[in-house]
Amino acid sequence: MKQAESHILVIFGASGDLTKRKLIPALMELEKQDLLPDDFAVLGVSRTELSDDDFRERMMEFLSEKDNKELLKKFLDRLHYQAISTGESYDYPVLRDRLFTIAKEKGIPENFIFYLSTPPSLYEIIPQNLASVELNSSTDGFRRLIVEKPFGTDLESAKVLNKNLLNYFAEDQIYRIDHYLGKESVQNLLVTRFSNGIFEPIWNHNFIHHVEITSAESLGVENRGGYYDHSGAMRDMVQNHLLQLVGMVAMEPPVVVEADAIRNEVLKVFQSLRPIKEKEVEKHVIRGQYIESHVKGKLVKGYRQEEGVDPESRTETFMAMKFFIDNWRWAGVPFYIRTGKKLPTRVTEVVIHFKKTPHHLFGSEHESEQQANQLVIRIQPDEGILLKFGMKVPGAGFRVQTVNMDFHYDDLADVRLPSAYERLLLDCMQGDATLYSRGDAVEKAWEYVQPIMNAWENNKDIPVYGYPAGTWGPDVADQLVKGSQWRYPCKNLSNDGTYCEL
Ligand code: BG6
């Protein structure tokens, strides 16, 4: 593994939620694993007036390692804070001076990573302001920029954002975070496919009947109603996280495991997505919105009653779609995506449904339909892999029953799954952009979903189906997968069938 070079990580939006809940705990974990460079500091930046000590105290609340006093002190000593008006260029000389002072005091070379954990409205202004004090130029040390999603809200705004970022930073300095790619189990998709001789030969239209990707959440929009109502499941989950998953499932083997080689293959998948025309949207895409219901005996509000949500909102909290990848490998294989809030459980998984045997030797054709093999790649929770195959029921005759062969990450003793942010932060520190989205792929993904969003916007006759909170979405989503059915996953990977914990 490459060693991360010494640097200062500047977090814009340091008083926000992401910083305390995800970034600081991830950095602390890297500290614990001894993966941070010796000479390393964090400079939190936001508008709120705080001293270094105030900032440290605030962050400490979110650290779990409070008992290890020595480690805690080492980590907290690395944290610094600078209040500036991030939107105003006149404050950037202050930021620059502070950065160089910390670098000098701590003997850190002029390597800087700028993490934009701010509202997207600042994504154009901050890079411009950094450039105004030459904090964008990598001549005296590296300068990298990490940007959180959303990367635009439609194709047009995504193009504008990319163009603006590229005015001040080069593509190889820009790290667009899609935290799904930081998940261990998502990376394992590549290892499953490309390190095993048995899967890749059958990973194509000759053997695969269809592919299903589900990302269900039991939570609703919580306190993010205001944001979500302008976003919806398409912008929030599908355009980014789930299409990236499709990229991993469908891509060709990369020439090498390197950023551009892998990202080229993902881009090719996006280029091969068969466009869904506006007039076909109703047939291929279902949208839904949760309505009030009782879940486990408790009354749960509907989406339109959530704070910050328009009482007449038509924003989708659920969507399911059917699509095709028009290339040699996937010709004719339907892909299905389903995602939603307030579904029965939190689970993300990819299910590869293999074709049935060509001839039905045992039982009726109907029975053998249930026996088509499935490979379930569980992204979360209970990360692992499950293969479903037919076994003879002991005794007379040839009765076939589907059984499970499963691997759970939990079974690996002493192995802890790093959080997505740990992995991604460390990668950026090491200058490895493999698990970050590239600008061209982000635009391609927007290009693909744009006609669907247009149809929803322009054609009010396309229904938004209500579904009771706590259910698997509107029933009509079942019609998309004609001839088969969605898998209804449980909390635990292999506990399906008669017993299912949600
Ligand atoms: C975020 C979305 O990007 O991903 C959230 O904005 C969603 O709405 C979250 O809940 C899901 O991430 P995870 O890691 O919990 O599956």
Image (spheres, helix red, strand yellow):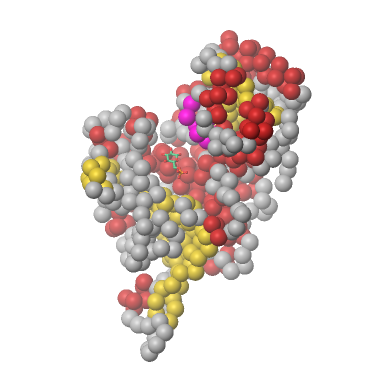
The residue nearer to you, when weighing 92 against 4, is: 4
Q: Quadrant of residue 189?
A: bottom right
Tell me where the magenta segment starts and ends, as one range.
Answer: 16-23
Relative to 67, 446 lies left or right: left
Q: Residue 140's x, y, as percent?
A: 76, 24
Q: Residue 394's x, y, as percent?
A: 42, 84
Residue 111 sits above or below residue 481 on the image: above
Split into quadrants, the picture shows ligand 1 in the one at top left
Residue 102 sits above or below residue 224 on the image: above
The residue nearer to you, when weighing 246 against 403, is: 403
The residue nearer to you, when weighing 137 against 181, is: 181
Q: Residue 53's x, y, as percent?
A: 59, 20
What residue is shown at x 71% (from left), y 37% (from top)? 4
Residue 500, magenta (yes or no): no
Residue 239 visible, this angle: yes
Q: Residue 502's x, y, as percent?
A: 36, 54
Q: How many marks?
A: 0
What residue is shown at x 31% (from left), y 37% (from top)? 315
Residue 379 sits above or below residue 36 on the image: below
